[in-house]
Image (cartoon, rainbow, N blue to C red):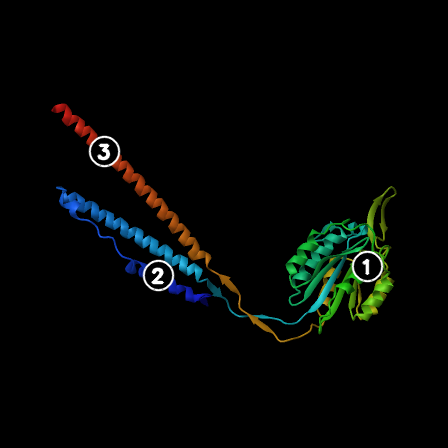
Amino acid sequence: MFEFAWIWVLAALPLPLLVYFTLPRHEKSESAALLVPNLIKIQGKTQKSTKRSNHRLFLASLIWCCLVLAAARPQWLGEPVSIPNEGRDLMIAVDLSGSMKQDDMQINGRKVNRLVMTKFVLKDFIERRIGDRLGLILFADTAYLQAPLTFDRNTVSTLLNESVLGLVGEKTAIGDAVGLAVKRFDEKENSNRVLILLTDGQNTAGNITPQQANELAIDKGITIYTIGVGADEQEINSFFGRRTINPSQDLDEKMLTELAQSTGGKYFRAKDTGAMQAIYKTLDELEPIEGDGQKLRPLTALFYLPLALALLLSALYCLGYILMQTFSSISNMRKTAAENKSNTASGGQS
């Protein structure tokens, strides 16, 4: 539906007419015309001048109408869109320790490290979080809040994508990550507080232990879902030929399991990209908080269209005026030169 936000501004449209008929007019003297013998040429010039004046008046009126229309703020209201009033406070904690550079994951047949795979899968997971407030924590030697709880999913996804290994150190402070998440959850009522913690190691740094952070999470009613990242087997080339190793031997699955189960959550093992995607599909089934839905109508401002047209017409008006004055000056100069030449010839004959 099309409408004007300030429709009362349209009352200014007839303002130029009001000024035109209200202000006193200047009387033109016609005595000079009686003294000119060549009346036909003067009438022709007068008609051309009147026609140009009418064109300029029409163009100026059109510019005024465009400016008034732009000031009235035209806008287009789209169809009503239902906005779900349901969701969770969901904090995502991602490990950026040095071990996340281990390239034991694959995306579309291409070998990548664990962080790249995490970003790849989390991007789609974040985009589907309509109605949830998301936050992002990055941790290594300590934990940092990269994005507070927000409905702006694009910003959270961008900040995650811009994270790099070594940004906050090389070790793993799992306790600090959980403690920071507990601190950042506000006192919003009727909300599921969920922490998704993704790591590939064990707690080797930080100011508080995972057990202490776990007690804080239980006290605040926060559900923790932990994800252990890393393959069980990886073939490497060594001096003695190819051999198979376990790149996830430092993963503390016992601690992650206790951390999750004690808060009512669950521990998941992500050995490859497919397993990670399946984990996030499971997390999609978390029961949301339902509330009264809201309907919003998307609004598109259109004021720039008549404003751009007014600017274009103004430029044409000024350009036409400049060209007219230029041609008039050239014509006068030629006429003066011709008269001077004629006078010179007449003087020579006399």
Q: Is residue 268 left or right of residue 344?
A: right
Disc 1 to disc 3, how far (Cα)?
Answer: 91 Å
Dot placed on the residue nearer the N-terminal end, 1 or 3: 1
* Disc 1 crowd, CA 10 A, few/some/many (<14, 14-19, 20+): many
Identified by mark 2, the residue type is: Leu
Q: Which residue is mark 2?
A: 15
* Left or right: 286, with 28 as reference point: right
Kindly state the secondary structure of the residue where label 3 is placed: helix
Secondary structure at numbered mark 2: helix
Between circles 1 and 3, the one closer to the viewer is 3
Give the residue at mark 1: 176
Depth order, front residue of 114/255: 255
Q: Nearer the viewer, residue 72 or 277?
A: 72
- The residue drawn where x is 17% and y is 29% is 343
Mark 1: which amino acid? Asp
The picture places residue 74, in percent across and down from the top left corner, at: 45, 62
- Left or right placement of residue 25 versus residue 272 in this view: left
| Residue 227 shows in this picture | no
> Earlier along the polypeptide chain: callout 2 or callout 3?
2
For discs 1 and 2, the disc positioned in front in the rendered view: 2
Report helix, strand or loop for mark 1.
helix
Q: Where does residue 127 sit, x and y in percent of width and height?
A: 65, 61
Which residue is the site of mark 3? 336
